[in-house]
Image (spheres, grey):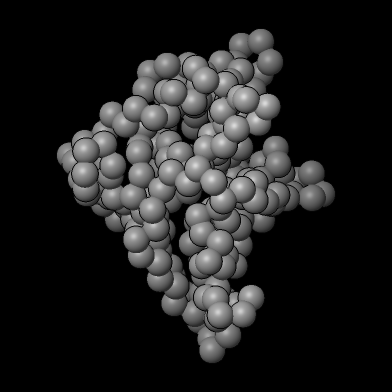
Amino acid sequence: MLNDTCLAGLWSRLLPIQLIWFVRDAKQANCSPAKRPPFYRAPSWSWASVDGEVSAGTVSYDGILITVTSAKVTPATNDETGQVEDGYFVLRGKLSPARLYRHATIDELQLRVNTKELELGCSVYPDVEPGDISAALICLPIMEYMVDQEPWIWGLILEADQLGKGFYKRFGMFMAHGLESCEIFKDSTFNEDVSGLHVDGDTLELYLI
């Protein structure tokens, strides 16, 4: 793309909507389980960081719920569209604590956000099949839009990184629909001590690596 910068497979002018790609059923095209490569290939927010059947998210530019305040990628060669050594985003948005649970009837992963179970009002797409569904996670809504007068929110599911407080990596993404489910994501319950850098009111800043 002319007059733009490639960030580990994503174009800077199309952020943040390019962050909401997802892996179908946590599988590869040959139906084998999706997986992260054994060596570093790309930041977790890039589709290049996972071997799986990746699908693009929505192309709507309305209702963006986050702000990308900084983005940096270090190319491994002179080709900015090729292999990278590292990369990160600094994002501002509303964060909500979450955990996975498996729905007893349909045997699918669901989200419990702010201690509230979303039941069938939310679809969960982990990048790879999780080994432990009891781990603490973070939900970061990316965009909101309307379909037939019904609200939808698409966002990222994150997990804390070992680098320390305020650093997160991608776990997967979610699609919430319906007024009741979407309202849950609008109430940020984190503070400076738990998540990242407090910015303004209920908006928090974090590093996504």
Q: Position of residue 184 (x, y in %)?
A: 42, 23
The residue located at (29%, 50%) in the rendering is: 205
- In this view, the residue in front, 164 or 22, is 22
Where 109 sits versus 2, above or below?
A: above
The residue located at (19%, 41%) in the rendering is: 192
Taking the image as shown, residue 145 lies to the left or right of residue 161, namely: right
Asked if one can make out residue 124 in the rendered structure from this viewpoint, the answer is: no
Q: Position of residue 84 (x, y in %)?
A: 51, 74
Q: Quadrant of residue 146?
A: top right
Taking the image as shown, residue 88 lies to the left or right of residue 197, namely: right
Q: Position of residue 194 (x, y in %)?
A: 23, 38
Q: Quadrant of residue 87?
A: bottom left
Number of numbered discs visible in the structure rendering? 0
The residue located at (64%, 51%) in the rendering is: 59
Q: Quadrant of the N terminus?
A: bottom right
The residue located at (52%, 20%) in the rendering is: 179
Which residue ends up furthest to the top in the rendered image?
A: 105
